[in-house]
Image (cartoon, grey):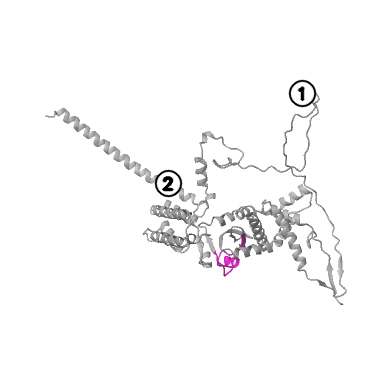
Amino acid sequence: MVSDKKVDQLLERITALEDRVDDLEQENEELKQENQQLRKENKRLRAKLRWYEGPHTPPSKDQANQDESSSSDGDEDDEQPRTDGGSPGRNPGHDPEWRTAPDPDREIEVTCDCCPDCGEVFDESAGVSPRLVEEIPDPQPPEVTQYNRHHYECHSCGSETVASHPDCPDEGQFGVNVIAQAALSRYDHRLPYRKIADRFEQLHGLEFTGASAWHATERAARAGRCEYERIRQHIQDAEVVHVDETGIKRDGEQAWIWTFTTEEHTLYAVRESRGSDVPAEVLGEDFAGTVICDGWRAYPAFSETLQRCWAHILREAEQAAEQQDEGEPIYRALKQLYVALQTQLESDLSLRERAELQRVARRELESLIERSVPDGPVATLLGKIEGGLDHWLTFVGEPAVSPTNNAAENALREPVVLRKLIGTLRNDRGMFVHETLLSLLATWSQQGRNLYEELKRVARDNEMISRAHAVPVVASSG
């Protein structure tokens, strides 16, 4: 038989275990409450982040991701913090880049007659250590030329002719070099007109004002307008065009700068409208290509042949998953579908195989749309997916079409930087100059051309075209 003492010990152990279970249950309940509070705080902080980080913010501007990646790369203890503001160097595994050594324009023999320590005279050199030094010449003062343009009167027809010279502009007192440098300083170096004037005076001793810099830049834009129209024609004939828009001020009022970009051409258009009339004007009513765009309603109003940007919808799905638990499986399924499509398309599929893959992917999207979710961010997300159902999978059937609109977003970066610097465009002339020069410089950069040489070329060509189309002055018979 079990003694009473042992029974009492067992009862004490049972009581202690029961007390321990009660303590653990209470601790578990406290942890649950703390967890719920932390989840609420996490949602609150994420909502606060959305004031400057939204689903339409490109990854390059996502400050949170940049902070995480910078803190997770490498061992912080092994690297000294940089104080010069420079980049940490090439990424691991990337080959270094070396500058190509230039051919010397001249050679200078650097010799020494005697030993600097004891004064012993040297007989001959024991060897040569060549060193290449690249230097730019001192800025040259402006060259002032007076063109005595002779006038002639035809005795047969009575017309009057003024002789022309290729380096003498028909208007203004500044030549093509000044025009090209002023435009480049403004739209590539991002200098204010006052600073452009200071630069000309400091480097070349040229008396120049901010107004002179503006007029020179305007002349560059007018000279390049024919080139602008040629870029527009190339884009109108393209099979695929990336389109995006962002806000800009025109005399303090809201306007929009649109970008239309292909692999070799980029066109900007500053308009007071954000509607479908702008792509209809720029691309033409009968545009037959595919437009890659975001979800702005102006695009489906303009064309039925669209590719909606997957980068946008994936960011929106991720944000919806953070806000609502029902969004997590939808975001995961959407991301898995996109990765699977990209993997499949890496192989050389025939058009028939692409069409079949497109049908399968559409059924996957339709199954997502059919899910029942409560009202909120996830329901809004599914509504967007359903609204663009005909436009998410164009890239699957057409090999030349990209699934994202990153090209247009990249093209808008330079105008956005300039927007922060200049604040607002003053009038129609400012809009004209802005869209023209931005388009020329962006296109020439895509094509690997020298921006300064191209600006000089269009300035000279414009003078020649103007003279070729000039109407002769007929002398009065009275």
Q: What quarter of the picture does the N terminus occupy?
A: top left
Cα gap from disc 2 to disc 1, whole angstroms:
74 Å
Please state the horizontal and vertical placement of residue 252, each as a whole percent of the image.
62, 59
Please state the horizontal and vertical placement of residue 29, each as a whole percent of the image.
32, 42
Three-letter amino acid code at the position of disc 2: Glu
Per the image, the residue denoted by label 2 is 41
Left or right of 125 on screen, residue 290: left
Neighbour tally class for label 2: few under 14, some 14-19, many 20 plus, Cα within 10 Å: few
Q: Which mark is residue 117?
A: 1
Q: Furthest residue to the bottom?
A: 478
Q: Is residue 235 above or below residue 82?
A: below
Three-letter amino acid code at the position of disc 1: Asp
Please state the horizontal and vertical placement of residue 416, each as a whole percent of the image.
60, 54
Tell me the residue at 51%/59% (across/down). 399
Q: How many marks?
A: 2
Q: Is residue 472 above or below residue 115?
A: below
The quadrant in which residue 265 appears is bottom right
Tag in front: 2 or 1: 1
Answer with mark 2 or mark 1, whichever residue precedes in sequence: 2
Left or right of 118 on screen, residue 233: left
Q: Does the segment drawn in magenta span residue 427?
A: no
Please state the horizontal and vertical placement of residue 384, each as a whole percent of the image.
45, 61
Give the magenta part as a residue range.
266-289
Badge 1 element? loop
Q: What quarter of the picture does the C terminus occupy?
A: bottom right
